[in-house]
Image (spheres, rainbow, N blue to C red):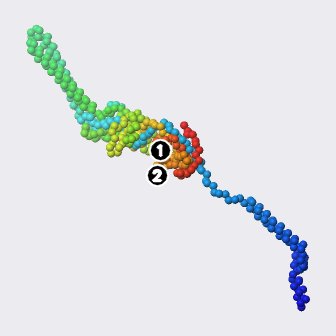
Amino acid sequence: MNYEGGKLEREHLLIAEGGDVIGEGPDPARRRRRWMIAIAAAVLVAVAAWWFMGRAKPAEAPRAPAATSVTVVVPGTQEADRRATGTGTLAARREMPVGVAGEGGMVSRVLVEAGQWVREGQVLATIDRSVQTQTAASLGAQINVARSDLTLAQAELERAQSLVDRGFISKADVQRRIATRDAAAARLKVSQATASEQRARNARLDIRAPAAGLVLTRGVEPGQIVSSASGVLFRMAKGGEMEMRVLLSEADLRGVRVGSRAEVTPVGDTRTFPGEVWQVSPVIDPQTRQGTARVALRYDPALRPGGFASATIVAGSSQLPELPQSALLSDTKGNYVYIVDGENKVQRRDVTLGVVDANKVAVASGLTGSERVVLSAGAFLNPGQKVNPILQKPAR
């Protein structure tokens, strides 16, 4: 039993390796080979770990964001027109109301319409004159009677003068005939004056244009009874000349002079009409603190008296900075630009605009012209932001 148990124990100690049977006894060559394989594997693992660690880059410290590059310009100053803007109404520069100058009567004809051009003295309307015509005829007959009386008195005087030297007629009779002749001459003059007065009255029954111009309104129709108390029957614009009465603030009015150029734009029209200031109000309304500048305009059908319009008046010139419109920004607080200070930081600068055209805008206040102004992309900047300014020369 002991012998068989010991044999089984020895068999269990045998190790099969690669199909070879290893006995229980020590084998130095095999153990050295296993140790060498283990050492080589450890060296390979160490080399691989070193290689991978060498390729991995160390973590870099976070960098500060680069400053944004922006284009800036130093605008300087240029001579620019200083303009005043205002609104007002259109009117005839010289409006002429036309009414009845005589005794009046029933209107028989109206010969013109509103919007029609007329010459000086042209008949606008006529009043029935049937009665006045008969009166004029009667006065004409009286003139003929007076003239006949004068002729007879003159003939009698001449005969008396031829007989006085022969003693047939006294000098007293001659003097009476001279008086009779003079009285007949006076009656003739009275008759002629009365007839002339009647003709003048009849002529005033024709309502005539006092000067050449444009008929603006017509307020009478045939059959209407008119008199000197009837008021205005026609309104005319002398020569068709128009004007705009521009309301300006007290400060703006101070720079406006007679002869200042102006541009007028009627409401509902995209066209502008050139004009010239011909009168500046000498007083300021104490309630509105405004005054009136009257701008003379040439006639145009678009300039209708009573209409509303806006005007821009050149009120002198001054040295102002000018910028491209891309530099201008606006919000609820008003217009502003961004400037770059000495530390290259963006700062907001509120400005007041002057003349604005398609390419540039004059800055009336807020800039001296020596600042570095951001030309574009201002909407993407914030006050206090640091930038990299790139200077661009302003266009002249």
Q: Quadrant of residue 159?
A: top left
- The alpha-carbon separation of the residues under discs 2 and 1 comes to 17 Å
Q: Is 249 in front, or is 91? A: 249
Within-10-Å neighbours for mark 1: few <14, some 14–19, many 20+:
some
Image quarter of the C terminus: top right
Q: Is residue 375 above or below residue 157?
A: below
Q: Earlier in the sequence, mark 2 or mark 1?
A: 2
Answer whether residue 113 is visible to the viewer in this image: no
SS assignment at label 1: loop
Circle 2/circle 1 CB separation < 8 Å = no
Is 283 located above or below residue 187 in the figure?
Answer: below
Q: Residue at x 54, y 49 (%)?
A: 346
Q: Secondary structure at mark 2?
A: loop
- Judge by depth and name the residue closer to the eye, 285 or 41: 41
Residue that numbered label 2 is attached to: 332
Query: Which is in the foreground here, disc 2 or disc 1?
Result: 1
Q: Quadrant of residue 160?
A: top left
Q: 88 above or below 24?
A: above
Residue 339, x across and y down, in percent: 53, 46
Name which residue lies at 87% across and 85% down. Answer: 9
Q: Amino acid at mark 2?
A: Thr
- Residue 236 screen position, x and y as percent: 34, 36
At label 1, which amino acid type do we have?
A: Gly
In the rendered view, does 160 fall on the left or right side of 394? Answer: left
Residue labelled with disc 1: 366
Residue for point 30% across, 39% down:
233
